[in-house]
Amino acid sequence: MRLLGSLLLCLCIPAALAAEANAPKLDVGKGGECVKDTQWMRKNHMHMLKHQRNETVRKGVRVEAEAFKACVECHASTSDNSVTAREDSFCVGCHRYAAVKIDCFECHASKRKEALAKKETK
């Protein structure tokens, strides 16, 4: 039984290290402290966003820290103020790596508020 456990451990560690080595290098923008820890967000952010969407749209409840706008404000690149402009942009990079279609920005702005304000004054 120990031998089987050791064998499984030996097989899992290289696979985990390889996955980490292949993970995309992202421009995390300002980054810093998120509303949840990194591993939780990687696994559950879509559920949190859907829940927040339902609370906001159907009940009118707005939690600023968990608003989609807050995600963009924090994670947009400091060079172009966007989470979708380049291959290494925060949202695009992860969604391409995971082969997941990203449709948030069909309705939501992908740039920080300050960048949108500059665009409107031109």
Image: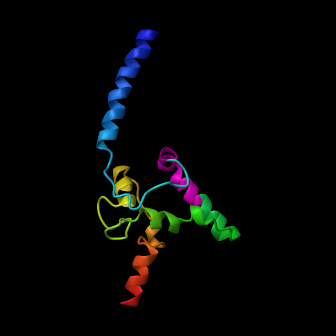
Residue 116 rendering spot, x and y as whole percentages: 42, 79
Looking at the image, the residue that sits furthest to the bottom is 122
Specify the quadrant of the image occupied by residue 121. bottom left
As drawn, 20 above or below 47 = above
Figure check: 42 above or below 81 = above
Q: Residue furthest right?
A: 59
Q: Position of residue 101 (x, y in %)?
A: 41, 59
| Residue closest to the eye, 23 or 53 | 23
Asked whether 95 or 83 is in front, the reply is 83
- Coloring scheme of the render? rainbow
Is residue 40 one of those drawn in magenta? yes
- Residue depicted at 35% across the width and 21% down the height: 10
Please provide the residue range marked out in magenta: 38-50
Whole-percent x, y for residue 44 in the image: 53, 49
Residue 112 screen position, x and y as percent: 43, 72
> How would you classify the magenta stretch by its main secondary structure?
helix
Q: Which residue is pictured at 47% across the width and 48% down the height? A: 42
Picture quarter with the C terminus:
bottom left
Numbered-mark total: 0
